[in-house]
Structures are given as C-alpha cells and as structure tokens.
C-alpha cells in the first residue's frame, strides 16, 4: 500500500448523552462519513468512553467507575464491530477499561485501545505506563500492560501507543526495530502542557523511526465547565522530515482545541504516504539521514560523578 487515508476525531467529551445507543448512533454517523470519503479508518481519543459517565447510575460508587465503563464497553464493542463490518471501515474507538486478573481479590483494569476491522478481527493494545491519577486509583484500581502488539492491517505493520507512553524513549527504541508503517497515538491531556508533550514527542518519533505517526486527543471532560476546563485536544499526522516525504514533517494538523471552544472536529488525513516512508526507512530511497538505524550501545559514558 502506497497511501492510507484516516479520519482522526478530536471528540468533545463535555456534551451529555442520555444512553449508550445515542453515543453509538453518533459514532455511526461519523463512520458513515469516513466511509463516504473513502478513508480506511476512524480513530477516537483515549478514554472517549468517559462520555458514557453522563448516563451512569447516580449511585455509582467512585471506586467502581472503571468497572462500570468496562461493562458498558463490552456492549459497545459488539456494536462497533458490527459497524465496522457494515461500512467497511476499521474503527479505533479510543480506549476502554478492560478487566484484568484480580490482585488479592481486588478487581483491576487495564487502559486498553481496540482496533476493530471489517473482517471481524479485534486487535488490542494496553497502556504501558500509568499517569499519577491512574496510579492513585481514580475510579478503581488500574494496572499497566506489558506487551507491545504489532498489527498486520491492510498490508501495513502498525502499532497503537497510548498517550503517556509516547514520552518514553526506551519504548521507542524497541519500536524502532519493528519496521512499523504506521503508529497511532490516542491521547487525553488535561492541560496544554500535556498536549505539547505528547504531540511534540509524536513528531520527534516520526523523524526518529522514519514512519507516519497519527496522534489525537479529546476536548474537555465529562460534566465539565467549558469556560474553566483546561483539557486540550487536537489531532496531527507527522512524517519524517525528508525531501522525499515532507519538508516540515507535518502531513495534516488540527490546532489545539480548548474546552471553551466547544469544538468537535474530525481531521481528515488523506493519502498518508506510508509507501514513501517505508522506502526511506528500508534504504530503498535516498534519505538525508537514518536516525532509527543508529545504536548507542557502543558508547562509553565518561562521567566524573560516576567514578
């Protein structure tokens, strides 16, 4: 495959929805638009499912929020899988809590991204690192994943990396050896600083790995106050900075969206040049530099403080 077209929905989480069917109907309307444009995939941000909390039971215990979202997610995923088959579009509906094996009898949950494809397959990737809020047990006990999943999709090798995981160079040094054609980063950042960290790292990774990196984040939070909320969303597709691909490394971009803007935009990323990136990465086209092929294991650290 030479090019791939993907829609990135920087979903606004602030508007309330009365029930899961309404949310699914809204998603289906977006999927239909993606199919009409001839795109292959629709992607939602990390914890897009948090909007479901607007119809959660009034007496839902705070320490069972992740459990309740997991139960809703099992219903939602079946419906999303049917949508994918019906429209011929792969759907990444953000991340949804997923029940892992209990620890000392206590329910625990992974922050899991799903990619559902028209052929009925369900690929998943767990978040590999926890934010301080997740580690503190907000909504229930969260645990991190321990596996990197490489997905074969439409002739491409892709991976899903979730929000905070984009910031760790040790992870990306492993990813750089996997010859990935496309990396998708669903994110949810509560401040402009978090947005800048995740999106800046995503841009650097596209250069480092010589591949296409799609990143998107949600706007606002459930039950939010748009004028005071600090949650920032947006979407971008980054490429290697090379004359054979892109001069600035930006294929498509949606500027940061604050909650006060009340936006709910889809970034239409048409014809992402995955083939050109692959040729650069594999030495089949002239590249200015090949950063992903450089290994630092041979270096000696000369540090007086360590003597």
Image (cartoon, rainbow, N blue to C red):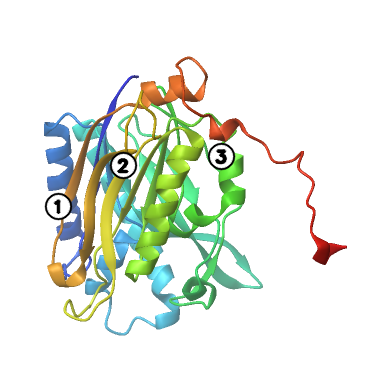
Whichever of callouts 2 and 3 sits on the residue coming sooner in the sequence is 3
Which residue is painted at 76% across and 42% down in the image?
299
- Left or right: 242 in relation to 18: right
CA separation in Å, label 2 and label 3: 18 Å
Q: Could you give the CA–CA distance between mark 3 and mark 1, rounded to whole angstroms? A: 36 Å
Q: Where is residue 297 shown, x and y percent of the image?
A: 74, 40
Observer-nearest of 44 and 16: 44
Is the C-beta separation of discs 2 and 1 under 8 Å?
Answer: no
Q: Secondary structure at mark 2?
A: strand
Seen at 16% across and 72% down, the residue is 260
Q: Which is more foreground, mark 2 or mark 1?
A: 2
Can residue 270 be seen from the camera position used here? yes
Q: CA distance from mark 2 to mark 1?
A: 27 Å
Check disc 3 and report the residue beneath it. 175
Report the side of 145 relative to 20 (left or right).
right
Which label was assigned to residue 237? 2
Q: Are marks 3 and 1 in contact (CB under 8 Å)?
A: no
Q: Earlier in the sequence, mark 3 or mark 1?
A: 1
Q: Quadrant of the C terminus?
A: bottom right
In the picture of the structure, the residue carrying the numbered disc 1 is 25
Within-10-Å neighbours for mark 2: few <14, some 14–19, many 20+: many
């Amino acid at each position: 495959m030479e090019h791939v077209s993907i829609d990135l929905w920087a979903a606004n989480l602030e508007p309330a929805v009365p029930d899961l069917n309404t949310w699914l109907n809204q998603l289906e309307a977006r999927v239909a638009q993606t199919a009409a444009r001839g795109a292959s995939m629709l992607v939602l941000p990390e914890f897009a499912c948090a909007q479901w909390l607007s119809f959660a039971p009034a007496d839902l215990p705070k320490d069972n929020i992740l459990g309740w979202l997991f139960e809703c997610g099992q219903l939602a995923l079946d419906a999303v899988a049917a949508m994918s088959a019906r429209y011929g579009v792969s759907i990444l509906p953000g991340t949804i809590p997923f029940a892992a094996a209990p620890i000392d009898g206590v329910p625990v949950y992974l922050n899991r991204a799903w990619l559902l494809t028209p052929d009925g397959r369900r690929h998943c990737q767990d978040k590999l690192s926890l934010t301080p809020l997740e580690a503190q047990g907000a909504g229930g006990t969260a645990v991190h994943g321990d596996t990197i999943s490489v997905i074969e999709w439409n002739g491409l090798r892709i991976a899903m990396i979730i929000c905070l995981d984009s910031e760790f160079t040790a992870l990306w040094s492993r990813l750089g050896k996997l010859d990935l054609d496309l990396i998708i980063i669903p994110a949810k950042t509560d401040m402009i600083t978090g947005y800048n960290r995740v999106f800046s790292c995503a841009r650097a990774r596209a250069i480092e790995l010589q591949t296409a990196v799609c990143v998107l984040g949600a706007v606002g939070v459930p039950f939010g106050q748009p004028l005071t909320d600090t949650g920032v969303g947006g979407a971008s597709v980054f490429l290697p900075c090379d004359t054979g691909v892109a001069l600035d490394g930006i294929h498509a971009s949606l500027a940061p969206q604050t909650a006060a803007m009340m936006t709910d935009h889809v970034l239409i990323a048409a014809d992402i040049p995955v083939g050109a990136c692959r040729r650069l990465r594999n030495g089949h086209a002239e590249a200015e530099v090949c950063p992903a092929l450089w290994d630092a294991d041979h270096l000696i650290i000369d540090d007086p403080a360590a003597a």
